[in-house]
Amino acid sequence: MSDKESVTRAVLSVKMTTPTKNDHLVATEIPMNKTVLAIIVCGMFALPASADTISGGKVTSVDAGGTSFNYSKKKKKWTFKITDKTVIRVGDKTGNLSDLKTGQPVKVEFQRHGDAFAALIIGIGF
């Protein structure tokens, strides 16, 4: 490297503010390399889709095969898929598919998968 050449290096950092014992705020700058930044950014996009919740309606039917159930609230209707990850809660206890009955009010936490809705948690007795 000659005398005329110089190297420019970007420093990535995170600024954090923390309270002290006297309720004063102290700003601290923590250097971060590109790899750590890349991991954080990639992790943000790898998070699962957020879940939605609906309540105030009732079960209108349960599929005989146990793969879905229909739900109605006012004049709207939904069909929710039941997967191996679906959890059924009866009050504060874990239930099973046989606890899900037509006409029963339930609370459903679900995720959208394209045009379909997958039930994550079905709450009975809430």
Image (tube, rainbow, N blue to C red):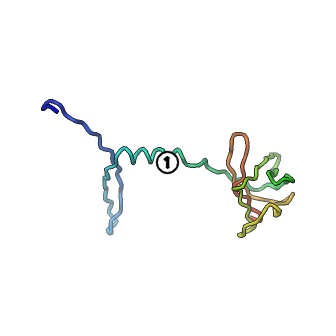
In the rendered structure, the answer to whether residue 23 lies left or right of residue 46 reads left
In the rendered structure, the answer to whether residue 86 lies left or right of residue 1 reads right
Question: Which residue ends up furthest to the top in the rendered image?
Answer: 4
Is residue 71 visible in the rendered image? The answer is no
Packing grade of label 1 (10 A; few <14, some 14-19, many >=20) is: few
Percent x, y for residue 101? 85, 60
Q: Amino acid at mark 1?
A: Gly
The residue that mark 1 highlights is: 43
Question: Which residue is depicted at the point 71% across and 69% down?
Answer: 92
Name the residue nearer the viewer: 112 or 25: 112
Question: Which residue is depicted at the point 76% across and 49% down?
Answer: 81
- Considering only vertical position in the picture, is 16 above or below 117? below
- Considering only vertical position in the picture, is 23 above or below 118? below
Question: Which residue is depicted at the point 24% across and 36% down?
Answer: 8
Secondary structure of the residue carrying tag 1 is helix
Percent x, y for residue 99? 81, 64
- Considering only vertical position in the picture, is 109 above or below 124? above
Q: Quadrant of residue 103?
A: bottom right
